[in-house]
Image (cartoon, rainbow, N blue to C red):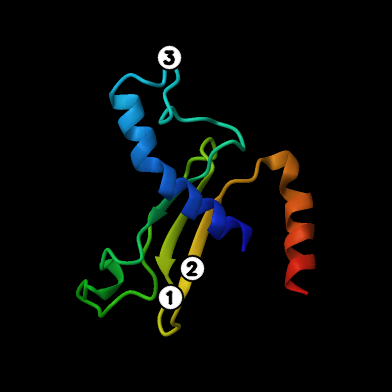
Amino acid sequence: MELVGMVREAKRRMAEECLSWAEGRTGERDPFQMTFNYESVYVSDWSKLGFSDVDYGYGTPMAAGPLVNCDLIASVIVMKAPAPLAGTRLLASCVTKEHTDDFARRMRKDLA
């Protein structure tokens, strides 16, 4: 899958890019500067934090994850699938409003 390869490549580069930046070898470029376009997607893994394993007084929750209300930053959050399902759920916020119809059409095509 193309996305998996992109994430793996970014993770592979991260340590070297951080060291280069800390040593001042990147010039004025900050590799960790947030962008607000399709250039970067920020990935956060919540699947192993244990929120869905805690009994909050009424049993364990069907699903647990962040309240996301920021359309400015392209992001993907990895979470456990809601009970009783096994697997992974992805919460993605990475398509601008003007591209949503085309994105949805392509997703339906890929799922068919």
Q: Residue furthest bottom?
A: 84
Query: Is there a contact, CB below 8 Å, between mark 1 and mark 2?
Result: yes
* Residue 71 sits above or below residue 25 on the image: below
Query: Disc 3 vs disc 2: which is toward the camera?
Result: 3
Q: Nearer the viewer, residue 26 or 60?
A: 26
Q: Tell us which disc is closer to us: 1 or 2.
A: 2
Give the structural element (helix, strand or loop) at label 1: loop
Residue that mark 2 sits on: 89
Q: Is residue 39 visible?
A: yes
**From mark 3 to mark 2, how far is it between C-alphas?**
38 Å
Question: Where does residue 78 sit, x and y in percent of width and height?
Answer: 43, 61
Indicate the amino acid at tag 2. Answer: Arg
What is the spatial separation of the Cα atoms under label 3 and label 1, in whole angstroms? 44 Å
Classify 38 as above or below 27.
below
Q: Which numbered tag is attached to residue 8?
A: none
Of residues 64 and 94, the one nearer the viewer is: 94
Nearest the viewer among 81 and 17 is 17
Indicate whether 110 appears above or below 10: below
Q: Quadrant of residue 48?
A: bottom left
